[in-house]
Image (spheres, helix red, strand yellow):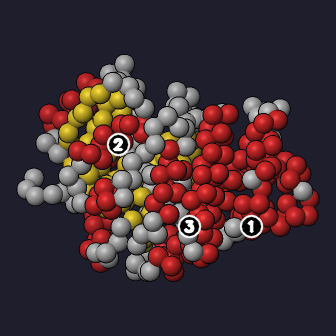
Amino acid sequence: MEGKPVFSIIIPVFNVEKYIKECLDSVINQKFNDFEVILVNDGSTDKSASICETYKLIDPRINVIQQNNRGLSDARNTGILVAKGLFLLFLDSDDYWNDNAFLGNLAKIIGSNPETDVINFGWTKYFQFKQQFVEDTRDYSILQVIVMKPSDIIPSMIENDLFIASACNKCIRKEFVMKNQLFFKKGIRSEDMEWCGNILYLMPRMTCYNSKAYIYRQQRIDSITATVDKAHVQDIITMIKNAMVLSHILSADKRKIYMSYFAVQYLTLLYNVCSKKLRADRQIYKETYDLRNILKYDLNKKVKVVRKVNAILGFRLTSMLLYYYVK
């Protein structure tokens, strides 16, 4: 492969021998072939490492990095540092793409919008125990046509819930990542949430791709992200507090955009304070209650509704309603 590939696909690997073949097949069978695959085996104890090495022998575009178990953030960061592609994509090793034109369509969007730094796209959830696929209902086509100024497109994305806390639904320019040192924070459970918040803080040029080709596997019992526990919730609380501090140096318009993103994440707290795991935790309840004023940043439609309900019913009833509605 001469020169820099268009895409570097970074796939952290940890004990996914059941899923990694489907993941890799979905990548190497793409019609568009100007890409590299970076497999970061993060200390797997099953057959994942040997499967990765076998695929490396089959396809020269595949690079395998072996490291001791250091977690998802570190594995992704390793991939970022060695990536040669102009754009980065993150694919979890138990997920896959179901469209072999996915990369080709992304390349066309980049060709039509050469100044874009971030392309956002949708996904489809796969509930494997039910053998059920549920397509994301968000309509990215409303913002797919052209790269707009950040001051125009980002508020629309927040309002319509199109900028979400996931690294895997974004294609991001490598130069933009390195220039702004956009690495994943180690030792936290909500690394995607913080990373996406850091992207938003920079107000990059973005566009969208109305694809649901990313198949996001749900309810994997052995997945470290299968449950939300106290540590996860505490991470979100800390992120919101840090965002409040950082937002003070932004203009009023940018502050509203930035904090509206974290107001969406706050809804996760409202939901979880009534969960079986956390409903008796007074500390979590108090900290969540103390952050309730973040709901005033209501560019997002869901946040706007919750803010109005909270004003009428109060914090406790609102959190209970949200819990039982989502449940």
The kind of residue tagged 2 is Asn
Query: What whole-number distance in Å separates the C-alpha atoms at marks 2 and 3?
Result: 28 Å
The kind of residue tagged 3 is Ile
Q: Secondary structure at mark 3?
A: helix
Which mark is first along the chain, 2 or 1?
Answer: 2
Viewer-closest of 45 and 81: 81
Q: Do the numbered discs 1 and 2 sit on residues whose CB atoms are within 8 Å?
A: no
Q: Secondary structure at mark 1?
A: helix
Tell me: residue 155, above or below residue 135. Answer: below
Pointer 1: what residue?
Answer: 296
Residue 315 visible, this angle = yes
Judged left or right of residue 175, residue 278 is right
Which mark is first along the chain, 3 or 2?
Answer: 2
- Residue 4: image quadrant is bottom left
- Which residue is located at x 89 percent, y 51 percent? 317
Viewer-closest of 226 and 299: 299
- Which residue is located at x 72 percent, y 60 percent? 294
The kind of residue tagged 1 is Lys
Residue 21 position within the rendered picture, expressed as x and y whole percent measured from the top left? 32, 35
Q: Quadrant of the C terminus?
A: top right
- Residue 81: image quadrant is top left
Q: Do the numbered discs 3 and 1 sit on residues whose CB atoms are within 8 Å?
A: no
Pointer 2: what residue?
Answer: 77
- Which residue is located at x 85 percent, y 47 percent? 320
Residue 121 visible, this angle = no
- Which residue is located at x 38 percent, y 37 percent? 74
Q: Secondary structure at mark 2?
A: helix
Judged left or right of residue 305, residue 16 is left
Task: Please identify, in this view, whether the residue under mark 3 or under mark 1 is nearer the observer.
Answer: 3
Q: Do the numbered discs 2 and 3 sit on residues whose CB atoms are within 8 Å?
A: no
Pointer 3: what residue?
Answer: 249
